[in-house]
Each structure stands twice: as C-alpha cells, then as structure tokens.
Image (spheres, rainbow, N blue to C red):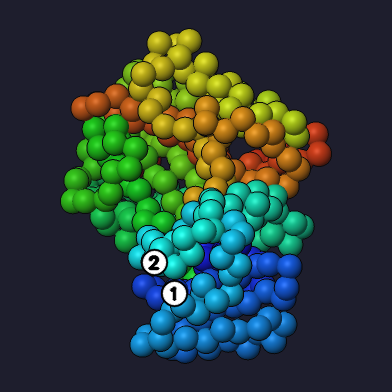
Amino acid sequence: MLVTDPHSIRYLIGVDIEPGERFLGLFLSEKAPKLIINRLFSTSVKDYEIVWYSDTDDLTGKISQLCDGERPLGVDKQMPARFLLPLRDRLPHSRMTLASECVDWVRGVKDETERELMRMNSRINDEVMLRTRAFIREGMTEREVADYLIAQYYDLGCESVSFDPIVSFGANAADPHHMPDNTVLRRCDCIVVDIGGKKQGYCSDMTRTFACKEASEELKRVHELVVRANETAESVIKPGMRLCDIDRAARDVIANAGYGEFFTHRLGHFIGTEVHEYGDASAAFTKEVEEGMIFSCEPGVYLPGNLGVRIEDLVLVTRDGCEVLNRVEKKLEIVG
C-alpha cells in the first residue's frame, strides 16, 4: 500500500511534512516500511528506510521498483492523479485499489492522548465563542467579527484556525457555507458563527446562532427546533449505534416539524488532525460507532432569503454514551 495523505503519514510514523505539489509517500509491505521524500525536505526519522528523490529523477520508476508488479497495490484517497496514472501505466499488471479506509478508521478512534488534546482545543473554542459573543455589536460587518475572532485563537496559543470562520448575518445565514463579507449587522438579524482553532496538531469546531437586539418569533421557533434536533441526536449516541441512525434521529425531529427540506447537509463529520476527517454521521455511513470516536453533531435549518440556524457540538463516544466537548450555552442569546 502507498499512503500519501500527509496527515496519515504523520499519524502513523510521526513525520510531519507538507509536500505541496511534490510526492510524499509511505510504502507498506511485508518488508520494512519505506518513506519516499523529495530531497528538498528533511526528516530526523531513523526507524524507516528513506527513498530520496529529486525533481529531475524518474519518480515513477523509483516507486514502481518498490512494488511487485504482479500483485495488487492499495492507494489512498489523497494520491493525486498526476502520480497515480503514470504509476498505473508503469505497473499494467498490478490491480490498484482504494485502500485508505484501513488507516482512516484507525484515525477515527482517538486514544487517550488525542482525546485530551481534543478536549483542550474545545475549551479554547468555547472561550473564543464567548469572547466573540461579547464583542458583536449592531453596525459591525461580518468581516470585522471574523477578524476579531481569528485574533483570539492566536491570543490563546493556537497555531492557526482549523478552517476559515463562518460569520453570517440575516439572510446570509441561509447559506450554510457563507464566507464573511461587508454585510452590516442590523437589529433582528440572526447571526451564525461557525469557528474552530488548531493547537498541537488537533482541531476544534463549533457553531452557535445568536440574534441582534431581539429575535423574531420565527427565529425563536426554528432555533428551538434545531437545539432539540441537536440534543436528540446526542442523546442516542453510544457504541453500537449506526452513524446513519444518529443522523436520522436529528433529521426526523426537523422533518416532523415541517422543515425537512431545509436541513440540507449531513449531521456531522469526523474530526482530529483535520477538521474534516474520513467518516460522516450521515445516511451514507452504516458503520457502528466505537468508543473514542469524535465527530460533530450539527443540524441546521436554512430558509432562503430569510434566516439560518445551526447548532454544532463535537461529541466523544464513551463506553455508554457520549461526552459533549463544547460547553457554550445553546439557548438563543441576544447580542449587540
């Protein structure tokens, strides 16, 4: 198997290299693992054989020499076509198959060290959300709020944000992935804030929805519904529960209230060294959850041209339920 996802390589052997457009690979077989690295990079790893190459070398030839051309070769989901297709041509008798799930599902179950890192990052995320809630004022732009909250992560010792923050006012909140712009906050606007930071290589993620000065009856009603869907899903999470059934628990709450068509995305995603790791709480995944898995629980309702509400926590699956990693109040807070 060729592992080419830098996050998986870091997870498996502790080598942290961001290769950019160049090839980085960990070749796994019955023999000793081999790390394939461009000479532009350096590593202190001593437990693995290193196959060095330069920009002018026949990289495809070097990789093909490691392989048994008569046997199947597993590749992971991140291997770029510019490397995969020439290798396939060089190994015409080797059946290539997507094999990254064997690493992805191991990454999905966090050990105790990883769990503590995720708890720490969620505590930081809680603090950033609280600071942001206190900062927001009528007349500010989405961009102003986003710039402020990004600065808070660095103030609290993070390496970076784990993704570009989402700050959406009013009708912009009906777009689940709206990026902050110069929209000005007005009285009665809903405010969706979806944020996360990264520290010691692990990510956080959380969403809360507020109202500026006062909330309309419709916003109150939709917000209460989304909170109920969030808490219903969290209440059923435990080892042995299927991911698709957790998604269904939240989706049924929203559908039964008549808003099913406005819940337009999966319930959640796995998270760790990447903010979106392999694995979804969605109808597409029938796998049973295991103790140690961490994923988001983020139902939402989006009414085009009007408003949007999303409530997101990270949950850690425990022996008999789940631990919600976020502590910021879910009730509809009035800000500004």
Of the two numbered discs 2 and 1 on the same chain, state the one appearing first in sequence.
Answer: 1
* Image location (x, y in percent) of residue 8: 58, 63
Element assignment for label 2: helix
What residue does disc 2 label? 86
Q: Is residue 21 left or right of residue 36?
A: left
**Which corner quadrant holds the C terminus?**
top left
- Compared with 267, 120 (above or below) is below
Rendering quarter of residue 118:
bottom right
Element assignment for label 1: helix
Residue at horizontal 47%, vertical 33%? 266
Depth check: give the residue in front, 163 or 137. Answer: 163
Q: Is residue 186 left or right of residue 151?
A: left
Q: Residues within 10 Å of mark 2 (few under 14, many from 20)?
A: some
Q: Residues within 10 Å of mark 1 (few under 14, many from 20)?
A: some
Depth check: give the residue in front, 37 or 191. Answer: 37
* Residues tagged 2 and 1 counted as in contact (Cβ below 8 A): yes
Residue at horizontal 40%, vertical 76%? 22
* Image location (x, y in percent) of residue 46: 69, 87
- Could you tell me the amino acid type at mark 2? Pro
Residue at horizontal 69%, vertical 33%? 288
Rendering quarter of residue 67:
bottom right
**Which corner quadrant holds the N terminus?**
bottom right
* Image location (x, y in percent) of residue 26: 59, 71
Depth check: give the residue in front, 121 or 276. Answer: 276
Residue 9 shows in this picture: no
Rendering quarter of residue 178:
top left
- Could you tell me the amino acid type at mark 1? Thr
Residue at horizontal 69%, vertical 37%? 289
Q: Which mark is residue 60?
A: 1
